[in-house]
Amino acid sequence: MPAPSPVAPRTSADIPALQNIASQVRRDIVRMVHAVQSGHPGGSLGCADFFVALYFHVLRHDAAKWDMDGDGQDLFFLSNGHISPVWYSVLARSGYFPVSELATFRKLDSRLQGHPTTHEGLPGVRMASGSLGQGLSVGIGAALTKKMKGDAHLVYTLHGDGELQEGQIWEAALFAAAHKVDNLIATVDVNGRQIDGDVEDVLSLGDLRGKWEAFGWLVLEADGNNIQGLLATLEEARQNTGKGRPVMVLMRTEMGQGVDFMVGSHEWHGIAPNDAQLAAALAQLTETSGDY
């Protein structure tokens, strides 16, 4: 299923095709992490539906014309960079680099580092991420640059809910609303888990919707593991750009979605499956596009 043209009108999404891609992406994730016994499968699995919806239907982008500036295209910035496996899989399968390169994940001299970096020159990656809290600031800067250039394309960002414990996020949130950065759509993966346990137990975020609204953002909510509903919410977000406020999508997901023994457990935030667990995971995930 090709990525959409950056200028083509949106057509109805082929939901079964997108679900098939998401299944393949989940296979990529568990295989990549297993191969090097290192990485972050839980959040990656939970966000697979979002990344597939974004790159195969929502974003106006063209892998063949990728450059660091991104003029004339929508931009995406991953702030919670530890979920790099899902991003790498979707970038490869939407044409940014060969799918076979996924086999180099986290290996020496690979462009696919554990946290995305820029000095290796990996197409699709415009900022190093993994130091949490920084992606919203970068997204705001990119959105303001598009405004200055008269580029009507949009900027999207993704953040983890545990990441919202970082103060820089809220400074950026204030700035975006005060400066009417209304070509920005930020998304938070609200899975309720972080490396040390439940977000509620580590440092409760309270009323997230109320907080973002109080900071001056338009807030929408979505089921991040329902592609059809997620697409509808992202379209609503797009329709509300250009109206004087940045847009926040609070996306509720399950960590480890798609693999029954990983679902809902913070313990799979950053550990790799063993051989038996890999086999069990793959048995639950249909191969639809061909493993690398």
Image (tube, rainbow, N blue to C red):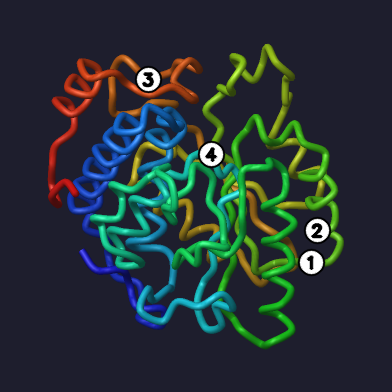
Which corner quadrant holds the N terminus?
bottom left
Residue beneath label 3, please? 263
Give the Cα separation between the discs numbered 1 and 4: 30 Å
Residue beneath label 2, please? 177
Question: Mark 1 is on which residue type?
Answer: Lys
Question: Mark 4 is on which residue type?
Answer: His
Residue 161 spot, x, y in % from top left: 62, 33
Observer-nearest residue: 253 or 141?
A: 141
Give the Cα separation between the discs numbered 2 and 1: 5 Å
> Image point 82% across, 47% down: which residue?
215
Quick one: SS at disc 3?
loop
> Image point 54% across, 68% down: which residue?
75
Residue beneath label 1, please? 180
Give the Cα separation between the discs numbered 3 and 4: 18 Å
> Image point 48% across, 40% down: which residue?
83
Residue 96 spot, x, y in % from top left: 36, 67
Q: Badges 2 and 1: C-beta atoms under 8 Å apart?
A: yes
Mark before the other along the chain sequence, 1 or 4: 4
Question: In this image, 173 relative to 279: left or right?
Answer: right
Quick one: SS at disc 2?
helix
Mark before the other along the chain sequence, 1 or 3: 1
Q: Which mark is residue 82?
A: 4
Give the Cα separation between the discs numbered 2 and 4: 27 Å
